[in-house]
Image: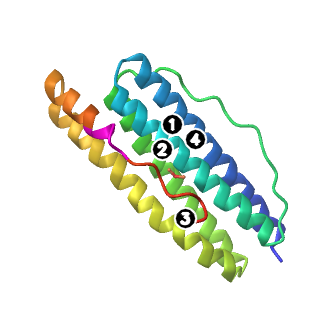
Amino acid sequence: MITKKMEKALNEQINKEFYSAYLYLAMSAYCNKINMPGCEHWFRLQYDEEIIHMTKLFDYLMQHGGEARLMKIDEPAAEFGSALSAFEAALKHEQFVTQSINELLNVAVEEKDHATQVFLQWFITEQVEEEANAKEIVDRLQMIGDNGAALMMIDDKLGQRLPPAPAAEA
Ligand code: FEO
């Protein structure tokens, strides 16, 4: 049976994953507006990925005897300045989520909740990948600056991103 403190922390993480999905959907819309369809596609798939993260937490919480509480989701920005700025904001956000997952694991350790500690290992590994993916794109966009042809090439490449595996397989 899950403790109230662990239940609250998992519910807060569900809210953060929902916000992440919202944020990436807003970034996708922004990239549509600035005519970067590859970036739009990449952020749209990132939205799907965050919904998978949220669903994993949501399902686990109830399976573990907890009560899921859906909280208000903050409104993300609509304007990001440039594709580079959007990806920089995405990287910063992933670093925030990594910190949040680490704190969640600290709660599981404090609560002596071994099952949740094991469950969270997937998220710990996932965050390494999430940060690396965003950082790679930021580095490339910084490197090319205002080079229009190179920007189009990166946009094309980001447009080739494949959908994430469904929650049950992830
Ligand atoms: Fe759910 Fe991008 O971390």
Instruction: Please name the amino acid that badge 3 sits on.
Output: Asn
Q: Which residue is mark 3?
A: 102
Q: Earlier in the sequence, mark 3 or mark 2?
A: 2
Secondary structure under the numbered disc 4 in the rendered image: helix
Bin the neighbour count of mark 3 within 10 Å (Cα to Cα): few under 14, some 14-19, many 20 and up.
Answer: some
Label 1 to label 2: alpha-carbon separation: 6 Å
Bin the neighbour count of mark 1 within 10 Å (Cα to Cα): few under 14, some 14-19, many 20 and up.
Answer: many
Q: Which residue is mark 4?
A: 21
Label 4 to label 3: alpha-carbon separation: 20 Å
Foreground disc of the pair 4, 3: 4
Instruction: Please name the amino acid that badge 4 sits on.
Output: Ala
Q: Are marks 1 and 4 in contact (CB under 8 Å)?
A: yes
Instruction: Please name the amino acid that badge 1 sits on.
Output: Tyr
Q: Earlier in the sequence, mark 2 or mark 4?
A: 4
Image quadrant in which you'd find residue 91: top left
For the stretch drawn in magenta, what is the main secondary structure? loop
